[in-house]
Amino acid sequence: MRAARMLLLAAGLVLTGPVAAADWTWRLPDYVPAPRVPTDNPMSAAKVDLGRRLFYDKRLSGEGDIACASCHEQARAFTDGRALSPGATGALTHRNSPSIVNAAWHATYTWANPALTTLERQMEVPLFGDDPVEMGVTDANKPKMLARLKAEPLYPPLFKAAFGDEAEPISLANAIKAVAAFQRSAVSFDSRYDRYLQGKGSLSEAETRGMTLFFGERAECHHCHGSFNVNDQVIHVNTRDAEIQFHNTGLYNIGRDGGYPFPNRGLFEFTAKPADMGAFRAPSLRNVALTAPYMHDGSIKTLAEVIEVYSQGGRLVKAGPLKGDGRRNPHKSGLIARIDLTAGEKSDLLAFLEALTDLTLPTDPRYADPWKQAQ
Amino acid sequence: MRAPILLLAAAGLAACSTVPADDATQPVALSFELTSAGRPAVCGKPLGPLGTAKTAAKLHDARFYVQDVALLDAAGKATPVKLTQNQWQNGPTALLDFEDASGGCVGTPALNTAVVGMVPPGKYVGASFTVGVPPAQNHSSVEKAGAPLDSAAMNWSWQTGRKFTKIEVDPKGGVRKPDGTKAPTWFLHLGSTECAGNPAKGETALCKRSNRVPVAFPAFDPATQAVRLDLASLFAASNIAKDQGAAVGCMSGPTDADCPPVFGRLGLSLETGLPVEPGKSPAFTAVKKP
């Protein structure tokens, strides 16, 4: 009995130890559990500091011409304002640049990829991806890229501080770990809605009506956006088994059999199961007013238009190669129904969504470009 | 309590007596060759004609991983070859590389056309291997794994795995796509698909479609014979001048119409990711060494 208890205690220490033991403290509201951090990449202030440098450094790319920050701008809650983003060769990404904010709590990464479960592995996609090329790192140019990092006087001491126990701290593997740690540090819980939840502020009447709609059975937004991170795929220190859900929201219906355009068929790209056609991960709606355009392919320009699509229970594409009535997509989630919101309800919902904008994140110096800050 | 211990001991003994690590003293080298209609397929030289449309083409890339190389005795029993650990071989996995980065090929100058290792002395009459990377290595991080699993080109980040094959050809005149545009390269990226991780357990992934190709030659002498992958045979049922949608060529997409012909030549079922007849892969043949 005693041995079992000690084992339990030890297991608990292993889980929380690296986070608590290092010089890192999560400052989170009481309704937010600490994120799960990979045991081989514990948080530390030095690592986050280094990761922030690298995140904003174009030298961390194949030809030194594109940085993580090129598609993830702080002022836009770490998105880029484009429908699709050009990579190093000018080729466009297949999907809309997602926010890095609160990504520490995501169970899977990118718009629909059940295989990507850590930020560390996710980062290999933009770094090495060749369809399309994003940051353009290859076997051939990797040594030059590492040489560029080693030539920056700030980096050797920063890598040493973060990975000092290693013989050669400057490596791409460690750069990935540092950027992942910086991304985990980018937390956002200071919206008007958070201040209301924490008793530090109040919501307007329109925002309150919008919140009631959002969490109520009329608009039912909460089914997919109901967590503290305003989405439905969440993992944290206490998670025993993560629920991984993807949803078809009726954006397309090509050929009337539910088709979405390649290579944006969502979970279907992995499983080839008709039921997974058009199924994507519900994104967090935190800071959503800053992250236009919307949807996995950036195909909706404004938040008001997004609300209109949900009000109609999907989107009718009237002409062109993508023609089809998404509202009648046979694989559409049962949670998306035509609800014909009134003009007043739409503006109330919009008001609530705008209250999810973090008031400090877009200018918080902890997440800003360190190369532009005074040394 | 006593029975399980005995069982465990027996299992341990059995494992020891079948593959005594120190007994692997007989060197073996399994040679591979890449050809096109029987002639060496090399960068910069014309290939073909290839496929149903008899299309002239040039090599763009030609690399593949093999795992579980073994020699077979007369009864068909496999004895694993203990691979020499070097920049081409890691654990049970080896990378074969037929492109030298010249003449329109992408990749690295170095070539690697043989798997080398040791077996316990014995009478062997055949050989077998599997095109692929074992699951335990397949999902390792390309930045943490040792060579040759550290190749970014062979990394398949979106499935958190490896491309088992990166065989790419540039057909003369390009590849015509359904929307009327053209692409320069027809890709054959074989790899495990329908992979999913368990976020509660970190970096692990399980794939529903293995897409590994076991190849066995019951009669094979490594001293005088080589394993041949022939591109004309591999693309015999494909039209490489025309893409039928989804990825250009076949990137193992379960609904990509360009996959069934080439999967058929590999001896794989696109639907299940399993071999149609284990050991049989029409594109691979045993030939006399040149």
Image (tube, rainbow, N blue to C red):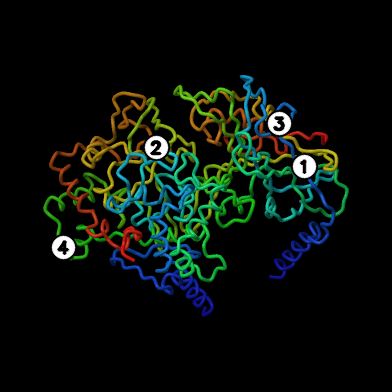
Q: Is residue B32 left or right of residue A196?
A: right
B230 versus A196 height, above or below: above
**Looking at the rendered structure, which numbered label has been put on residue A201?**
4
Q: For numbered disc 4, what is the local secondary structure?
A: loop
Q: Residues within 10 Å of mark 2 (few under 14, many from 20)?
A: many
Q: Residues within 10 Å of mark 1 (few under 14, many from 20)?
A: some
Disc 3 to disc 4, C-alpha distance: 71 Å
**In front: label 3 or label 4:** 3
Q: For numbered disc 2, what is the local secondary structure?
A: loop
- Residue B282 visible in image: no
Disc 3 to disc 1, C-alpha distance: 14 Å
Q: For numbered disc 3, what is the local secondary structure?
A: strand
Looking at this view, is A192 or A6 the one in front?
A192
**Looking at the rendered structure, which numbered label has been put on residue B230?**
3
Q: Residues within 10 Å of mark 4 (few under 14, many from 20)?
A: few
Residue that label 1 marks: B31
The answer as to whether the residues below labels 2 and 3 share one chain is no
- Residue A291 visible in image: yes
**Residue type pointed to by label 3:** Asp
The answer as to whether the residues below labels 1 and 2 share one chain is no
